[in-house]
């Protein structure tokens, strides 16, 4: 009986260690997203940012593996790409160290909390924390700290009845960053030292709702050529 209990304890411990292996969980996440070769989706974007006032906007996003993105709309130049077209591939590419932290319940889902630290000094993101559903391997939340753009978090929701690919139905992108307060029109011109003293933490959110996904239709590379030329 004692031998059986010892073996049972060892089996449970081994199984728990395997289910909490950070690298294996992240591999499952990446394998799920690799099923998405390309997609086209319509989005509705709502901005709530300290330094930018804008009405609700509509756009069309085109994506093709591994990292081709095109956003067809006017007025999106100021928006960070992380807030418009997030993919696990962009966050988990290159070399990084992953650390399993714990399990928490997030919006009714049991999630594994995993931290990733990119290796190398040329990375913009310093550290990220991911909340990953341990059954579906969908990312439900990401928090990242960057070198130059402050911190941001992304919360995802999924249509539970239509999940065939790991693509969200909505996303809430929240960020905070240091920036200079814009000078009012009637305010006298200040020198650079005075302006630097007026830096404060700016906060904002970008709410994105996705609709009419067209997945794996074989998007041609020509769709992305114009975007490539603009980036040069």
Image (cartoon, rainbow, N blue to C red):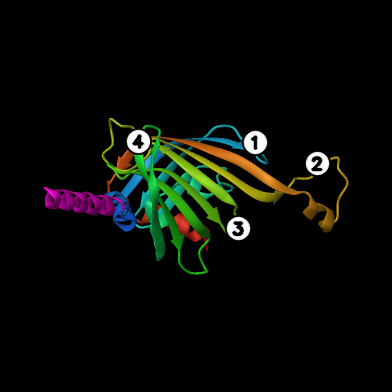
Residue ID for mark 3: 148
* Residue 136 placement (x, y as % from top left): 28, 42
Q: Residue at x 63, y 49 (%)?
A: 177
Residue ID for mark 1: 53
Question: Does residue 4 appear left or right of residue 113 in this picture?
Answer: left
Q: Residue at x 42, y 48 (%)?
A: 130
For marks 1 and 4, give the one nearer the viewer: 4
Q: Is residue 178 above or below residue 51?
A: below
Question: Does residue 57 appear left or right of residue 225 in this picture?
Answer: right
Secondary structure of the residue carrying numbered label 1: loop
Question: Does residue 221 appear left or right of residue 84 in this picture?
Answer: left
Q: State if disc 2 and disc 1 touch (CB < 8 Å).
A: no
Residue segment shown in magenta: 1-20
Judge whether residue 29 can be spotted in this image: yes
Closer to the camera in the image, 56 or 176: 176
Whole-number angstrom distance, CA of label 2 to CA of label 4: 46 Å
Secondary structure of the residue carrying numbered label 2: loop
Judge whether residue 31 can be spotted in this image: no
Q: State if disc 4 and disc 3 touch (CB < 8 Å).
A: no
Closer to the camera in the image, 192 or 67: 192
Sequence-wise first label, 3 or 1: 1
Sequence-wise first label, 3 or 4: 4
Whole-number angstrom distance, CA of label 3 to CA of label 1: 23 Å
Residue ID for mark 4: 109
Q: Residue at x 27, y 47 (%)?
A: 216
* Residue 34 placement (x, y as % from top left): 29, 53
Q: Residue furthest top?
A: 161
Residue ID for mark 2: 184
Whole-number angstrom distance, CA of label 3 to CA of label 4: 33 Å
């Amino acid at each position: 009986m004692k031998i059986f209990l010892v073996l049972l304890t060892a089996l449970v411990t081994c199984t728990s260690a395997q289910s909490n292996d950070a690298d294996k969980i992240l591999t499952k996440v990446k394998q799920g997203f690799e099923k998405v070769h390309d997609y086209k989706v319509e989005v509705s974007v709502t901005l709530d940012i300290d330094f930018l006032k804008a009405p609700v906007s509509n756009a069309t996003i085109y994506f093709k593996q591994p990292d081709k993105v095109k956003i067809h709309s006017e007025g999106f130049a100021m928006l960070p790409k992380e807030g418009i077209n997030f993919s696990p591939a962009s966050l988990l590419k290159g070399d990084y160290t992953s650390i399993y932290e714990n399990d928490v319940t997030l919006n009714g889902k049991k999630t594994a909390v995993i931290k990733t630290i990119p290796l190398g000094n040329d990375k913009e993101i310093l550290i990220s924390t991911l909340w990953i559903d341990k059954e579906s391997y969908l990312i439900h939340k990401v928090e990242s700290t960057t070198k130059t753009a402050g911190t941001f978090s992304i919360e995802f929701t999924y249509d539970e009845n239509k999940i065939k690919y790991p693509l969200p139905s909505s996303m809430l992108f929240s960020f905070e960053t240091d920036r200079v307060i814009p000078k009012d029109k009637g305010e006298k011109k200040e020198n650079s030292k005075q302006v630097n003293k007026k830096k404060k933490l700016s906060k904002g959110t970008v709410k994105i709702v996705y609709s009419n996904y067209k997945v794996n239709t074989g998007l041609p590379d020509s769709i992305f050529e114009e975007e490539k030329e603009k980036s040069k």
